[in-house]
Image (spheres, rainbow, N blue to C red):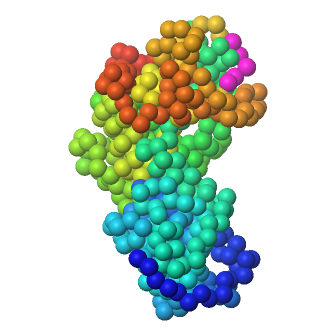
């Protein structure tokens, strides 16, 4: 597609910066958990006056550019489109935004970040049509789509394994007591971490043994504004009186546009989903870590926090599906008791799973370590494998089965119920 557009004067730089800030605000109006990215768009005339704006309200709805064009009507011709993400060129449920901008007579496009998916390429389409295109990096815009972009690159949700332990790696004492190993500051941070992820995942073993709520709360026990999807993995039913046992067959599956802001997805027929002000609960009746992540991605989840016992996390690790470790380390020694890390199948030091230390923070008396896996015999880069052999898949499936089996529960680091 080629064409020619009469070049209009560009809006003042200050107006473009202000429009980018406004576009980020608009993008944040979209659902936090959706298969599509959150995007905002502002249309500026040559004097820098806004003639239209919009945001993407979720999968299947018009994209931000289309909403802004509709708001501007005939005033869109000759304007500059300021967008938080490169306009798409993909033919899907909605027409390509790049084509819509060209058809509307937009002469310039400023976008804050490139689209890493197959829907990208809009910048090329626009340039071929004679539109002036400029990428203008913006930290706020990058933050809005960070989880989505990371998941798009991985082809699955980003997975963080959260561990709370003593200096010698214990998650409980020899007698099974575990509350509290870490400080109130660490536990408060763990709740804040929950607000930043799409889903918190435990096995049915942890769900039955610890009866966690998996909600995000402040120190007074009040629910924080952003709640994660709470996910239980395994085949066993949860009792009706448990904190996560409100899942009932036939209850509402959160879908596009509902109050929770969760995108619907196709899952196993015996999945059970319920929703409340504490956030939805999803029971995935599977033992396959890869299937768990596929189901969650289909529901708009871009980031996962693995909590609970080491068996479940170990299954994800051995399947090459852990990208990051978040460790809360208490200055205490127990000398005995269950460990935070399961058997990873490593028999010699040269095969050790090496990690990159990303940052260290102090939480009261504790340390918070954020680490990423590095390439080596025990793992692939970033802890993720693009393909899984039958052996690794079966090992991961068996381990998840163990994590959810009635007689194999290992004490978890569920310090944050």
- Name the residue rendered at 41%, 57% in the picture: 118
Residue at (76%, 27%) from the top-left corner? 365
Relative placement, left or right, of 411 versus 388 is right
User: Can residue 50 be seen at all in this image of the molecule?
Assistant: no
- Number of disc labels: 0
Q: Is 12 on the left-hand or right-hand side of 384?
A: right
Q: Measured along the vertical axis of the image, is residue 115 above or below residue 52?
A: above
The question of residue 275 being in magenta is answered with no
Quarter the N terminus occupies: bottom left
Q: Is residue 285 above or below residue 59?
A: above
Q: Residue 121: x, y in percent?
A: 47, 64
Q: Give the side of residue 305 with respect to residue 266, left or right.
A: right
Corner quadrant of residue 20:
bottom right
- Res 332 visible: yes
Residue found farthest to the left: 269
> Is 235 above or below relative to 175?
below
- Which stretch appears magenta? 329-333
Which residue does the image show at 72% across and 28% down from the upper left? 367
Q: Position of residue 222 (x, y in %)?
A: 59, 47
Residue 238: percent from left, percent from top: 34, 32
Q: Main secondary structure of the magenta part?
A: loop
Depth order, front residue of 364/265: 265
Is the residue 218 above or below the residue 329 in the image?
Answer: below
Q: In the current view of this chain or complex, which residue is farthest to the bottom?
A: 74
Tell me which residue sits at (25%, 49%) in the image. Answer: 250
Residue 402 spot, x, y in % from top left: 36, 20
């Amino acid at each position: 597609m080629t064409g020619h557009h009469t070049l209009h004067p560009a809006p003042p730089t200050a107006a473009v910066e202000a429009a980018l800030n406004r576009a980020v605000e608009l993008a944040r109006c979209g659902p936090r958990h959706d298969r599509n990215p959150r995007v905002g768009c502002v249309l500026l005339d040559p004097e820098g006056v806004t003639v239209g704006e919009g945001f993407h309200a979720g999968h299947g709805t018009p994209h931000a550019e289309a909403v802004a064009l509709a708001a501007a009507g005939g005033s869109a011709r000759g304007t500059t489109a300021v967008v938080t993400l490169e306009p798409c060129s993909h033919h899907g449920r909605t027409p390509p935004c790049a084509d819509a901008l060209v058809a509307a007579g937009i002469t310039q496009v400023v976008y804050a970040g490139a689209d890493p998916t197959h829907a990208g390429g809009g910048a090329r389409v626009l340039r071929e049509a004679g539109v002036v295109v400029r990428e203008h990096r913006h930290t706020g815009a990058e933050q809005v789509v960070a989880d989505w972009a990371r998941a798009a690159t991985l082809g699955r949700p980003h997975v963080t394994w959260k561990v709370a332990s003593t200096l010698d790696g214990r998650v409980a004492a020899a007698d099974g007591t575990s509350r509290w190993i870490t400080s109130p500051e660490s536990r408060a941070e763990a709740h804040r971490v929950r607000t930043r992820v799409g889903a918190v995942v435990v096995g049915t073993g942890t769900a039955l043994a610890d009866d966690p709520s998996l909600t995000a709360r402040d120190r007074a026990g009040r629910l924080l504004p952003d709640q994660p999807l709470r996910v239980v993995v395994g085949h066993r039913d949860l009792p009706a009186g448990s904190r996560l046992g409100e899942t009932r067959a036939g209850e509402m599956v959160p879908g596009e546009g509902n109050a929770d802001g969760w995108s619907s997805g196709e899952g196993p027929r015996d999945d059970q989903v319920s929703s409340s002000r504490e956030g939805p609960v999803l029971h995935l009746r599977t033992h396959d870590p890869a299937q768990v992540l596929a189901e969650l991605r289909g529901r708009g989840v871009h980031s996962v926090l693995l909590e609970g016992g080491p068996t479940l996390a170990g299954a994800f690790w051995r399947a090459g599906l852990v990208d990051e470790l978040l460790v809360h380390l208490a200055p205490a020694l127990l000398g005995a008791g269950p460990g935070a890390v399961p058997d990873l199948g490593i028999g010699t030091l040269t095969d050790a799973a090496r990690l990159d230390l990303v940052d260290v923070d102090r939480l009261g008396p504790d340390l918070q370590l954020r680490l990423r896996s590095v390439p080596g015999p025990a793992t692939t880069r970033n802890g993720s494998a693009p393909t899984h052999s039958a052996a690794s898949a079966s090992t991961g499936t068996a381990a998840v089965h163990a994590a959810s089996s009635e007689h194999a529960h290992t004490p978890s680091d569920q310090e944050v119920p």
